[in-house]
Image: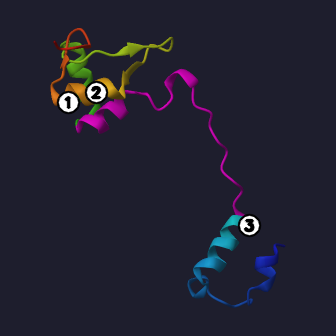
Amino acid sequence: MSSILQNLEKDKPLFSLTIGEFQALVSELIPAPVLVKEAPALSSKFVDVFGAASILGRTPSAIRKLLSTGKLTALKQGNNRNYFEREYLEKWMRGETDSISNKKRP
């Protein structure tokens, strides 16, 4: 049994714990989260359709429609998913990119 649990009064309700006691208890009872390694090529520089939707304030469905109509361009990886460069999305939102070619406007 953990030292925190041993030091708690047997009938002490959880809501009466201090924040420090509660954090210590939780950290002893719940193992550290398993870290998922992100693909290096898709680090924070790129986002998927859901990330693009969040950045542009639209739904994933609306992002797919913009892709199909050529108003947005995306990169594709081997898993046939669309990925967007964050910088491109921010520029597209400000109207600074040519939506068809993904290049900076003159």
2, above or below 75, in the image = below
Residue 105 position by quadrant: top left
To which residue does mark 1 refer? 93
Whether residue 48 is in magenta: the answer is: yes
Q: Amino acid at mark 2?
A: Leu
Q: Is mark 1 in CB contact (under 8 Å) with mark 2?
A: yes
Residue 12 image offset from top left, x and y in percent: 66, 90
Depth check: 41 or 77 in front?
A: 41
Would residue 73 be found to the left or right of residue 105 on screen? right
Q: What is the span of residues highlighted in magenta in the rendered image?
A: 28-57
Q: CA distance from mark 3 to mark 2?
A: 42 Å
Q: Is mark 3 in CB contact (under 8 Å) with mark 2?
A: no
Whether residue 13 is in magenta: the answer is: no
Residue at (36%, 23%) from the top-left corner? 84
Of the 4 image quadrants, the one containing the N terminus is bottom right
Q: Which mark is residue 28?
A: 3
Residue 60 image offset from top left, x and y in percent: 29, 31
Q: Nearer the viewer, mark 3 or mark 2?
A: 2
Residue 76 image offset from top left, x and y in percent: 41, 13
Indicate which disc, 3 or 2, sits on the residue closer to the N terminus.
3
* Secondary structure under the numbered disc 1 in the rendered image: helix
Depth check: 61 or 101 in front?
A: 101
Residue at (17%, 30%) from the top-left corner? 94
To which residue does mark 2 refer? 89
Q: What crowding class fits label 3: few (fewer than 14 Cα within 10 Å), some (14-19), or many (20 or more)?
A: some
Q: Amino acid at mark 3?
A: Glu
Q: Residue pushed farthest right?
A: 1
Residue at (20%, 30%) from the top-left corner? 93
Would residue 26 be found to the left or right of residue 51 on screen? right
Residue 11 image offset from top left, x and y in percent: 69, 91
